[in-house]
Amino acid sequence: MKLTVIGSGTMVASKERNPSSFLLEVGEKRILLDCGHSTIRRLVDLGVNPQSIDIIFVSHFHCDHFGDVFNLVHSRFVEYKYQG
């Protein structure tokens, strides 16, 4: 089991801190505990493909705990093609 703190303890993202989000990895499963604003960006910064998240758990419906949920769910169904 591995727990990665993606963000904690702030309403607005800054260079030093991000809204609530924790990645729990248990075996092959990736569980996101809360999904505040900037979670997707932080996942990418940490080398985690946002589409690899298996489960999202939202503790409560304040925007600093679910601000990126809809974007993350949307990314599960959309394949982006990057030009390089």
Image (cartoon, grey):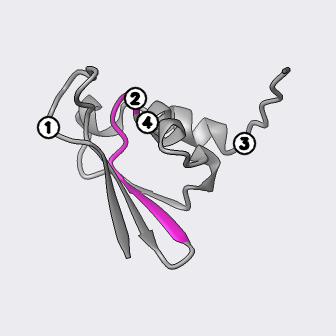
Mark 4, secondary structure of its residue: helix
Which residue is disc 2 drawn over?
38
Q: Which of marks 3 and 2 is nearer the N terminus?
A: 2
Q: Determine the CA span between mark 1 and mark 3.
A: 30 Å
Front residue of 84/81: it is 84
Measured as percent of width and height from the top left, residue 25 is found at: 44, 68
Name the residue rendered at 79%, 37% in the picture. 79
Q: Determine the CA span between mark 3 and mark 2.
A: 19 Å
Which residue is disc 3 drawn over?
77
Q: Which of marks 4 and 2 is in front?
A: 4
Which residue is disc 1 drawn over?
9
Residues rendered magenta in the picture: 29-38
Q: Determine the CA span between mark 4 and mark 1.
A: 15 Å
Q: Determine the CA span between mark 4 and mark 2.
A: 6 Å
Q: Which of marks 1 and 2 is nearer the N terminus?
A: 1
Name the residue rendered at 25%, 32% in the picture. 64
